[in-house]
Amino acid sequence: MKVLVPVKRVIDYNVKVRVKADQTGVDLANVKMAMNPFCEIAVEEAVRQKEKGTATEVVAVSIGPVQAQETLRTALAMGADRAILIQTDQDLEPLAVAKVLAAIVAEEAPDVVIMGKQAIDGDNNATGQMLSALLGWPQAAFASELVLAAGSAKVTREIDGGLQTVEVALPAVITADLRLNEPRYASLPNIMKAKKKPLDVKELSALGVDTVPRLKVLKVAEPPKRTGGVKVGSAAEIVSNLKSNGVI
Ligand code: AMP
């Protein structure tokens, strides 16, 4: 069973994001970048499936700038077999990413796509769902447990108030939630080995996919600054403060 894992290079989750002065976006200059945490979980899951013997090949794919090769090398060091970079300096929106991924799926013919539920930069939570629609494949989003079998996948999903278990026919798109697993750290020997694994680079323009933006970002702003707290003497005073501030 072949697994395709799309991974995105994003601002490292430890970095405090700064909004550009002209409010057109966030400042990426000299900012530490890393693999999107939900994509790490997806890679880990694919590698575990390979270690269990259910998957035979794990292919990581990223759409992004030349530096996204580092992200793909991380996926290779975690245990992916090979990687594909679709190189572009455009910041693509989810529909465009899904179209590019659909083109890769057509070339690679994986049995399952395991990807992050969300990229922590745009917080779109849309690409997996759009990809499944474009491919006409079943989707199981927000997986917290995955059992792959020949021809089907049983996926436990975290939903409000409990867990839902669904079975989808393969090929399918599965998106990883936080509790699916804890990704491993790549060991030094595996980082060294990853340098020799195949990494194909293709230009986005060579795919002939329509990536024209459908969305226009009007403004990006910092969240309002937190104002200082006040000390109160009693529970009654807390209640009265909440009431006077319109909280309750
Ligand atoms: P989003 O819908 O943007 O929140 O992203 C959800 C998932 O789609 C991510 O966790 C990735 O698995 C995948 N994805 C989004 N953008 C890219 C990209 N540029 N390259 C590869 N995968 C991506």
Image (cartoon, rainbow, N blue to C red):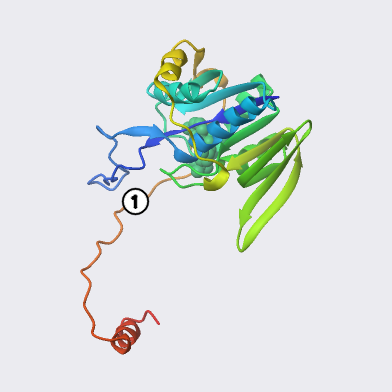
Which residue is rendered at x = 46% and y = 13% of the image? Answer: 193
**Is residue 75 left or right of 160 when viewed as pictured?**
left
Of residues 95 and 199, the one nearer the viewer is 199
Of residues 218 and 68, the one nearer the viewer is 68
Amino acid type, callout 1: Lys
Using the rendered image of the protein, determine whether residue 96 is visible from the camera's viewpoint: no
Which residue is under mark 1? 219
Which residue is rendered at x = 65% and y = 19% of the image? Answer: 107
Quadrant assignment for the N terminus: top right
Q: Is residue 30 above or below residue 17?
A: above
Using the rendered image of the protein, determine whether residue 160 is visible from the camera's viewpoint: yes
Picture coordinates of residue 106 (x, y %)?
A: 67, 23
The answer to which image quadrant residue 10 occupies is top left
Of residues 63 and 152, the one nearer the viewer is 152
**Is residue 160 left or right of 167 when viewed as pictured?**
left
Q: Is residue 221 above or below residue 62?
A: below
Which residue is rendered at x = 36% and y = 42% of the image? Answer: 13
Picture coordinates of residue 145 (x, y %)?
A: 63, 44
Picture coordinates of residue 151 (x, y %)?
A: 79, 32
